[in-house]
Image (spheres, helix red, strand yellow):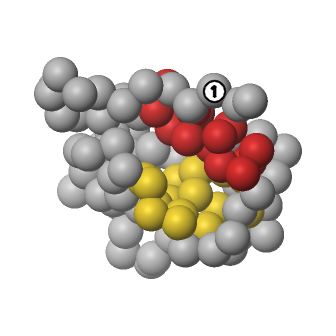
Amino acid sequence: MCQEVFRPCFPSYHFLPNSCYTMQMQGPQTINELYYCLRNKPGGPISVLTTNSYVVGEYDVRTGDIRWGRVVLASQKVQIQNYLHRHFPPATSTSTQKTQIVAA
């Protein structure tokens, strides 16, 4: 079924025994020293996790919206939002695209 298999650089991250991890899926990507992001299935939401693997939010690539599930410092939110919008631009091509958030 799977032709090319990608092994992520995080050795402690385990996949289901019958799961297929192909190059079309996104492996863990470091956002900054405290957070990283990961997409569990193609076309699915991108999870934002702490280095202790707590899920703090989910980013929807179709809309560009981030749903926060845990408290994150405002300065860290700005960094995370800018990273996600830069690396995973929203798929919607409306004229009201969200602009990058600038820290004050």
- Which percent across, then down, holds residue 23? 39, 38
Q: Nearer the viewer, residue 4 or 35?
A: 35
Query: Could you tell me which residue is drawn at 63 percent across and 74 percent down?
Result: 70
Going by the numbered disc 1, the residue's amino acid type is: Val
Q: Residue at x 36, y 74 (%)?
A: 18
Does the image show residue 39?
A: no
23 or 69: which is nearer to us?
69
Above or below, 28 relative to 72:
above
Image x and y of residue 37, in percent:
58, 51
- Please tell me in which quadrant of the rendered image residue 49 appears: bottom right
Q: Residue at x 51, y 38 (%)?
A: 84
Q: Check the image and report above or below for 32 versus 69.
A: above
Give the camera-side residue of 25 and 81. Answer: 81
Foreground pick, 65 / 10: 65
Is residue 83 left or right of 54 when viewed as pictured? Answer: left
Residue that appears at 76% across and 57% down? 73
Q: Which residue is mark 1?
A: 102
Quarter occupied by the N terminus: bottom left
Using residue 13 as the reference point, say whether residue 69 is left or right of it. left
Q: Mark 1 falls on what kind of element? A: loop
Determine whether, in the image, residue 53 is placed left or right of residue 90.
right
- Report x, y in % for residue 95: 17, 22
Note whether residue 37 is visible.
yes
Q: Count the labels in the image.
A: 1
